[in-house]
Image (cartoon, rainbow, N blue to C red):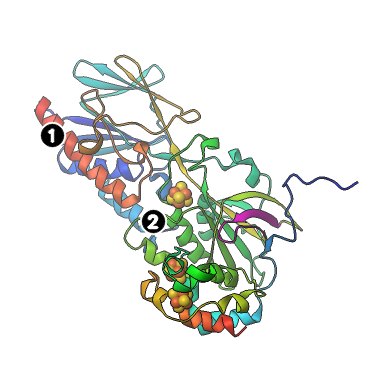
């Protein structure tokens, strides 16, 4: 009989495991666009994103995936952006969002 | 005319600065400190936020100004009650009369939250779990690092809000200085161990002061500190002396785990003293769970006077506050005391 887990252990499928090494591809994304580190997850970019109204695209969530070293869904998700640049005009931390998305889309 | 006398309880930054201001105005000051050394928490700090000014520089400057013939510093002296005697006040230790003065200033500061109360973080059980104040001692080489210093890339986590914003600890308030202290300490850690990976677990980043947000920005860009939004739920032992931590990564909406070589708990400020509500005298009592800081009746326009004429309060015993604000409060309170003494003369 399996032991019932009441949430006191970390479920391995869902957990973000920061003990894993950051993939080199993502280190390169940071090297090419260091301003991605500057995001404070305020959500402004997502609130005014026109693509987001149709697709649920949220740039800052993508950026969190990068910072947690989670590569797999990045490129596909990044395709929803139409590179209009509206977000970048509003970002309070001056993140070069479009360039970031371009790099993510190429992964 | 005899010189009027003021007693000050506590020789941390608030007590020292008010003593200096009052002495310069010509009053006689008796400055009581319960510890063996003056300086309060400042004496145990390495560098200060946001400019990383050495703490001893600030304390030395205060100590030099306090070498004033009008100030006598009495260390190792704990005061337990303040009692009225005509228009004067008497300081007592148990039943013993210590001195009689014209006004009393309470400047007994704050205590650090006892991290062992937050059992899920394992402080006092796992050697790799230290408090923010112990980290300052580590920076000053007063004790050894709890991990092998030759590690190529030690992993270090900082947990915000330990003992603050936490009803389970009886403290609903925010301690105000620990967010920026965490950012400062993260940078200091990266300077000490340049290849270290430093993570900060926060609920909100409260960067309210000038230069604080800038420091946060610098920690992200220059020092690559990783900020993770989510309250650490627990720490447990991993291999060797390492610690495994668990949190909800609230930006991901997923649980997160991480193994660390050192976990730093950003302990909050708690009250150092509670004023007993006696009829005439004021008892200085040890705070109990959820007692809170000394509450000032005058609020916005007058936060230095208690309801009893001649009794004043300055500094962090009124609540969490930064060092520059303590110094300003101490100077302002000295002026209030001067005005009071001039009136009663
Ligand atoms: S607007 Fe800028 S700082 Fe805010 S979440 Fe988007 S990228 Fe981050
Ligand atoms: S550049 Fe992309 S992410 Fe930014 S507002 Fe336009 S569509 Fe949205
Ligand atoms: S200053 Fe920051 S770490 Fe300290 S209690 Fe407030 S929110 Fe928490």
Residues beneath discs 2 and 1 located on the same chain:
yes
Return the residue at label 2.
B56
Look at the image and give the residue range highlighted in magenta. Answer: B242-257
| Residue, far right | A1
SS majority, magenta: strand
Foreground residue among B281 and B239: B239
Residue B171: say if magenta.
no
| Residue under label 1 | B339
**Left of B238 or right of it: where is B173?**
left
Q: Is residue A13 above or below residue B235?
A: below
Which of the image's four quarters has the C terminus of chain B? Answer: top left
Q: Chain of mark 1?
A: B
Residue B76 is labelled as none
Residues under labels 2 and 1: Cα distance? 32 Å
Residue A13: horizontal and vertical position, in percent?
74, 61
Q: Which element is circle 1 on?
A: helix
Indicate which disc, 2 or 1, sits on the residue closer to the N terminus: 2
Q: Residue furthest front?
A: A54
Residue sitting at 18 percent across and 36 percent down? B336
Question: Percent position (x, y) of residue A30?
Answer: 54, 79
Magenta span contains residue B250: yes
* Picture quadrant of residue B34: top left
Q: Is residue B300 above or below residue B264?
A: above
Task: Kindly state the secondary structure of the residue where label 2 is placed.
Answer: helix
């Amino acid at each position: 009989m399996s032991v019932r887990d009441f949430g006191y252990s970390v479920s391995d499928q869902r957990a973000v495991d920061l003990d894993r090494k950051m993939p080199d591809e993502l280190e390169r994304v940071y090297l090419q666009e260091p301003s991605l580190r500057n995001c404070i997850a305020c959500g402004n970019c997502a609130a005014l994103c026109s693509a987001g109204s149709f697709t649920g695209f949220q740039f800052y969530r993508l950026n969190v995936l990068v910072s947690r070293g989670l590569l797999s869904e990045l490129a596909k998700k990044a395709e929803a952006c139409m590179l209009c640049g509206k977000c970048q005009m509003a970002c309070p931390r001056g993140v070069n969002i479009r360039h970031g998305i371009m790099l993510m889309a190429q992964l | 005319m005899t010189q009027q006398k003021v007693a000050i309880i506590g020789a941390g930054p608030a007590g020292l600065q008010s003593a200096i201001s009052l002495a310069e105005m010509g009053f006689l000051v008796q400055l009581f400190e319960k510890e063996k050394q003056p300086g309060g928490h400042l004496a145990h700090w390495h560098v200060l936020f946001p400019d990383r000014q050495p703490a001893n520089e600030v304390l030395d400057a205060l100590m030099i100004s306090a070498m004033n013939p009008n100030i006598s510093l009495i260390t190792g002296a704990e005061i337990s009650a303040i009692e009225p005697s005509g228009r004067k006040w008497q300081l007592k230790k148990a039943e013993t009369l210590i001195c009689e003065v014209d006004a009393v200033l309470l400047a007994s500061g704050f205590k650090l939250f006892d991290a062992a109360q937050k059992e899920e973080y394992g402080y006092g059980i796992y050697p790799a779990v230290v408090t923010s104040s112990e980290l300052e001692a580590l920076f000053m080489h007063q004790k050894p690092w709890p991990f092998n210093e030759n590690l190529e890339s030690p992993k270090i986590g900082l947990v915000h809000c330990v003992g603050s914003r936490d009803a389970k600890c009886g403290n609903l308030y925010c301690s105000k200085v620990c967010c920026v202290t965490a950012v400062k300490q993260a940078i200091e850690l990266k300077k000490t161990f340049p290849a270290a990976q430093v993570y900060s677990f926060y609920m909100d980043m409260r960067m309210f002061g000038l230069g604080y947000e800038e420091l946060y920005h610098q920690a992200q860009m220059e020092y690559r500190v990783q900020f993770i939004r989510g309250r650490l739920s627990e720490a447990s032992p991993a291999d060797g002396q390492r610690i495994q931590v668990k949190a909800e990564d609230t930006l991901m909406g997923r649980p997160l785990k991480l193994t660390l070589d050192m976990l730093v708990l950003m302990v909050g400020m708690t009250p150092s003293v509670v004023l007993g509500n006696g009829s005439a005298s004021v008892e200085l009592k040890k705070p109990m769970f959820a007692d809170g800081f000394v509450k000032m009746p005058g609020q916005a326009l007058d936060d230095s006077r208690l309801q009893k004429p001649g009794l004043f309060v300055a500094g962090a015993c009124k609540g969490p506050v930064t060092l520059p604000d303590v110094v300003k409060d101490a100077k302002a309170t000295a002026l209030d005391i001067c005005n009071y003494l001039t009136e009663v003369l």
